[in-house]
Amino acid sequence: MNIAQFGKPQNPDPYEIPQPGADKKRTNLLMFGGLALLLLLLGVVLFSGGSAAGKQDLSDAIDSTGNALGAITEYEGDLQTNPVRNALAPVRIILLGDYNNLASIYKSTYDAKKSFGSTPKPSSADITTLEAAVKNDTIDTELLDALQPHLLSAQRSLIKVKPEIKDTVSRTKITTVQRDLQSVADIIDTASR
């Protein structure tokens, strides 16, 4: 083998004459294809639609608070005892304020176009459980039991999202909502006894 040919593929046909510029054209096409692939991958990484840090957690907190508020709003007329009615009256007001605060934080931090209902609805699982409780005359205890998981879920989500919020006003609102949710949990715990 000739040293000048080392590293180059051997030409099986000695009569084939390589065309001048064919290698340059192929090189240019490969470079263009590689550049296009690199730009495509860069675009996918940058614009993949991944959610911002804390966005899903804040959305979960809003949903949990809304589900609890919706359950109270929907079934407070079916309550049978005055102590439970009296306990849930301030809870409803507190949760409405918290729901609105969390929605305003979400809009100012993540998506100004996102709309949240002014009267949230209970989850479908809560509707099933609470409708059966109305028929069985156990709505008071079932409603209190249905609220607790929503409050715990909202508290967990807010613990996760709080470090991601940089605005001091929004962080203060989240701290207030966390204290409110703890107060609401205490009220519900007292009413359950």
Image: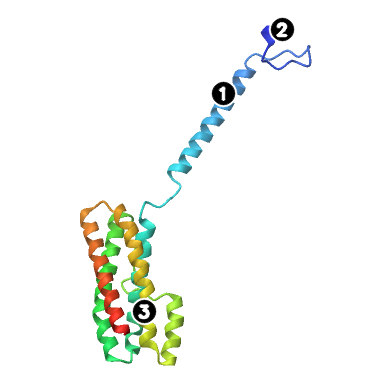
Q: Give the Cα separation between the discs numbered 2 and 1.
A: 29 Å
Residue under numbered circle 2 = 2
Earlier sequence position, callout 2 versus callout 3: 2
- Quadrant position of residue 110: bottom left
On screen, residue 80 above or below 74: below
Disc 2 secondary structure class: loop
Residue wearing tag 1: 28
Asked if labels 3 and 2 touch by Cβ distance under 8 angstroms, the answer is no
Q: Could you say which disc has been placed on residue 166 in the image?
A: none
88 sits left or right of 3 in the view? left
Badge 2 amino acid: Asn
Q: Residue 5 in the image: state x and y as whole percent.
A: 69, 10
In depth, the one of 122 and 31 nearer the eye is 122
Q: Pick whichever, 71 or 163, lies toward us.
A: 163
Q: Residue 113 in the image: state x and y as whole percent.
A: 33, 58
Q: Residues within 10 Å of mark 3 (few under 14, many from 20)?
A: many
Q: Residue at x 56, y 23 (%)?
A: 28
Q: CA distance from mark 2 to mark 3?
A: 86 Å
Residue at x-position 50% and y-position 34%: 38
Q: Position of residue 86 (x, y in %)?
A: 25, 86
Would you place residue 167 above or below residue 192 in this image?
A: above
Q: Upstream in the sequence, badge 2 or badge 1? A: 2
Which residue lies at the image location 46% right of the left edge and 81% below the top edge?
A: 128
Quote the CA–CA distance across marks 3 and 1: 65 Å
In the picture, the quarter occupied by the C terminus is bottom left
In terms of depth relative to the viewer, which is nearer, 16 or 38?
Answer: 38
Give 185 or 90, whichever is nearer the viewer.
Answer: 185
| Among numbered discs 3 and 1, the one appearing first in the sequence | 1
Amino acid at the residue labelled 1 = Asn
Drawn side of residue 34 relative to residue 82, left or right: right
Judging by the rendered image, the residue that carries numbered circle 3 is 71
